[in-house]
Image (cartoon, rainbow, N blue to C red):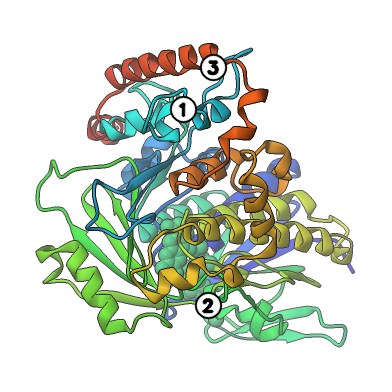
Amino acid sequence: MHPVRRILIVGGGTAGWLAACYLAKTLNSRAPGAIAISLVESSEIPGVGVGEGTFPSIRGTLSAIGIDEARFLRTCGATFKQGIRFVDWVRAPGGDGIDHYFHPFNTPSQRPGAPDPLPYWLLGDAGAGVPFAEAATMQKRVADAGRAPKRIGDPDYQGRMNYAYHFDAGRFAALLAEHGQSLGVQRTIATVVRAERDEAGDIVGVETREAGTLVADLYIDCTGFRAALIGEAMGEPLRSVRDTLFVDRALAMQVPDDRADAPLPAYTISTAHEAGWTWDIALQTRRGVGYVYSSRHSDDARAEAVLRRYIGPRADALTPRLLAFDAGWRPMQWKRNCVAIGLAAGFLEPLESTGIGLIEIATYLVAHLLPPDGDFARIAPRFNEAMNARYARIVDFLKLHYCLTRRTDSAFWRDNADPASIPASLRDLLALWRHRPPHRLDFVTDLEMFLPASWQFVLYGMEFATDPAALRPMHAQSARAREEFRMLRAVAARAVDDLPPHRALLDALCADP
Ligand code: FAD
């Protein structure tokens, strides 16, 4: 054991460079020059090159590492994301009406002293057929109207609505690489072929093909699905959750816009299909579209046909990229002097954009827990416990999207609703919520990536039924609640008038500086 003076990050995708920037910024502001941070990345092994949807935490991260918002938007072809619209998740297409619901980033509005809107929405006080997200937030109306979440001139990373971004993953990693080096991160282009360990099991150096052996006190594995250090060298296995989360393959396409004023939704569109779902993300000049599916329920040729049918003739000239993954995570992500961040640590699936969010959490934890004396054994259990809890809670949240479906049109959806595929922790919560709506005390919020409001939006977006009979005697403020719902509708209408169209804001922010 010796003091931490050198950190080596292996891998230069989003995980590697985000960790490099954050650690360089935070550790150096604590003790300038005390810890040297370097990153080695291969020019031969490509990164996954996907990961275009984010979670609102990314704003805090970008701000903390010192990238201004306009530079980020311009460089990464980025757009604003105010939530996710889920299409055809409840019922198969072809029935009556349009089947969609919205998961906004705003939490339900509740003025001081006003009642919690959820029980009153369940009691029908918001009006028949009004979705919970529309009754309880302004954001659904704002997003539906094509408005941006902030006004021109609002401060960086602050908006009238809560928001995240969509961006080009390759350009994002390149921006972070440039910024990381300006923060003093030493970059080496080389392929790691082997990690050498001492008798105790610590890594004592990584051998590269082009740059000799690189030595550090702490090694951060950001080599993606390859997991060159935590998996190959340290032998830590992945815990698969494929019996709960079935999707394990994706076909992705980049669809160029055919006109400068192409529609620009400020939300991700997630559409359910026979064996999975598509993401549809509008960037400034193209769309990123991908079909995520279960190889047990569809072969690749059939999946490609589904993707092409979804995109239409614009896909004819395009070839999809195939990505395969196994939903799961490594229970031991920090072992001795090696810690994994990003896909090397685990990956569940793209739904709800948790990949980059988990990178952010892991990076904050490393910066926060890093023991200056190098006694990693003291903090590794804390790190592993915190990450394990987060992954497990996310599994439940993701499964919530699938297991409440009423679709019976394919084996994928029937299997997803099979109680045997639902974790006991989620089954217990659903049993509870049959009789009363989710409450924040049902969650250990420090360990949840998704706040109780997100669970509520998905639960009731999926048309889950909570018995209102039990609510009525305990909720006698219907008149007040109706007034609050009416006021929120009026405020939402004003917000739609006040906020600029999504593209107008981007044009203003991305104009030459
Ligand atoms: P990679 O991008 O794979 O980077 C690995 C790096 O390691 C590369 O630079 C490579 O050159 C280097 N490397 C590998 N081996 C070696 C070696 N031996 N020596 C040196 N260097 C090496 N996340 C989200 O937040 N939102 C989304 O919408 C989203 N969508 C996704 C869709 C799909 C289909 C998939 C598979 C993932 C998605 N993710 C998403 C996850 C997201 O893409 C990743 O979390 C993110 O890109 C980080 O990847 P990474 O840096 O861990 O790995």
Left or right, residue 296 beside residue 97: right
Marks 1 and 3: CB-CB under 8 Å?
Answer: no
Q: Identify the residue position indicated by label 3 in the image.
A: 478
* Quarter of the figure with residue 251: bottom left
In the image shown, does 423 or 306 lie closer to the viewer? 423
**In front of the other: 221 or 470:** 470
**Mark drawn on residue 124:** 1
Q: Count neighbours of disc 2 (C-alpha within 10 A) and say few if under 14, some if 14 to 19, many if 20 or more.
A: many
Question: What amino acid does circle 1 point to?
Answer: Gly
Q: From the top left corner, tell me how far across and down residue 205 is, in percent.
A: 71, 80
For the residue marked with disc 3, what is the amino acid? Ser
Horizontal side of 495 relative to 350 (left or right) equals: left
Q: Residues within 10 Å of mark 1 (few under 14, many from 20)?
A: some
Task: Determine which of the numbered discs, if any, sits on residue 326 in the image.
Answer: 2
For residue 305, above or below residue 170: below
Residue 476 sits above or below residue 56 on the image: above
**Distance between the alpha carbons at the discs numbered 1 and 3:** 9 Å
